[in-house]
Image (spheres, helix red, strand yellow):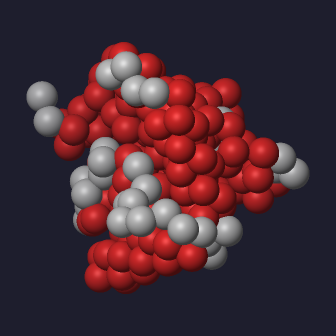
């Protein structure tokens, strides 16, 4: 059954149809919320809020875009509202970077790198995190969503409410600024975060 068919059934009061839509899109919704909030617990809350809001607004869904894109736009807006209200946003950004370093650390440890190499990788990871954290919000948001690998530029454009070409420019500019910051700190040709 397609999303459009499930939406039609859900509009008629079929809770199971909406439940199927939730199951299909919960991972994408969570990842979008996580990219915006930097916190798994906040992302869970945002995802729940987004699905509840989508259910309430199902009558306003106009099928001009896909249900997934519409849902991701709702999610992103909810996450941004939560992020704005949070006084701990920057601490979460650091925690978000730390979650990635644990995976990097496991990969390095399993490849039997030297302690010096591991320290260098940790230093680079921290430098990348700092460079991303100081980007203007519009560049940072576009970069984090693009680097997740979970969304097309069209989906990111819908979430951010910007034209697709603008999103592509923002991602490119964010990568350029991160690379420049890393080079300024003495890191060579490592400029791609992620």
Identify the residue at the far left of this view: 1
Is residue 143 or residue 154 the one in the foreground? 143
Q: Is residue 155 left or right of residue 185?
A: left
List x then y, in percent, for residue 150: 31, 45
Q: Residue at x 43, y 20 (%)?
A: 109
Residue found at x 33% / y 22%: 111
Quarter the N terminus occupies: top left
Question: Whole-percent x and y of residue 184?
Answer: 57, 76
Q: Looking at the picture, does residue 42 appear above or below residue 77? A: above
Q: Where is residue 130? Give x, y as percent.
A: 65, 59
Residue 172 or residue 54, whichever sits in front: 172
Q: Is residue 185 left or right of residue 191?
A: right
Q: Nearer the viewer, residue 77 or 171?
A: 171
Instruction: Count up the numbered dots.
Output: 0
Residue under the image location 67 percent in, 68 percent down = 134
For the question of whether residue 108 can be seen, the reply is yes
- Residue at 21 percent across and 38 percent down: it is 3
Determine whether, in the image, residue 90 is placed left or right of residue 105. right
Q: Position of residue 84 (x, y in %)?
A: 76, 58
Q: Quadrant of residue 163?
A: bottom left
**Residue 12: quadrant of the picture:** top left
Q: Is residue 128 above or below residue 42?
A: below
Q: Is residue 45 visible?
A: no
């Amino acid at each position: 059954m397609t999303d459009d068919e499930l939406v039609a059934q859900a509009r008629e009061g079929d809770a199971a149809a909406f439940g199927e839509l939730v199951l299909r899109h919960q991972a994408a919704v969570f990842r979008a919320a996580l990219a915006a909030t930097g916190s798994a617990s906040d992302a869970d809350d945002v995802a729940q809020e987004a699905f509840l809001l989508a259910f309430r607004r199902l009558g306003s869904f106009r099928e001009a875009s896909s249900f997934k894109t519409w849902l991701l736009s709702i999610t992103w807006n909810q996450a941004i509202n939560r992020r704005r209200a949070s006084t701990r946003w920057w601490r979460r950004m650091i925690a978000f970077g730390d979650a990635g370093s644990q995976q990097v650390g496991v990969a390095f440890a399993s490849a039997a790198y030297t302690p010096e190499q591991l320290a260098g990788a940790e230093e680079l990871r921290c430098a990348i995190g700092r460079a991303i954290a100081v980007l203007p919000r519009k560049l940072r948001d576009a970069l984090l969503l693009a680097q997740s690998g979970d969304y097309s530029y069209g989906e990111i454009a819908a979430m951010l409410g910007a034209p697709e070409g603008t999103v592509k420019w923002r991602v490119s500019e964010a990568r350029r600024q991160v690379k420049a910051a890393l080079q300024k700190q003495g890191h060579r040709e490592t400029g791609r975060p992620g």
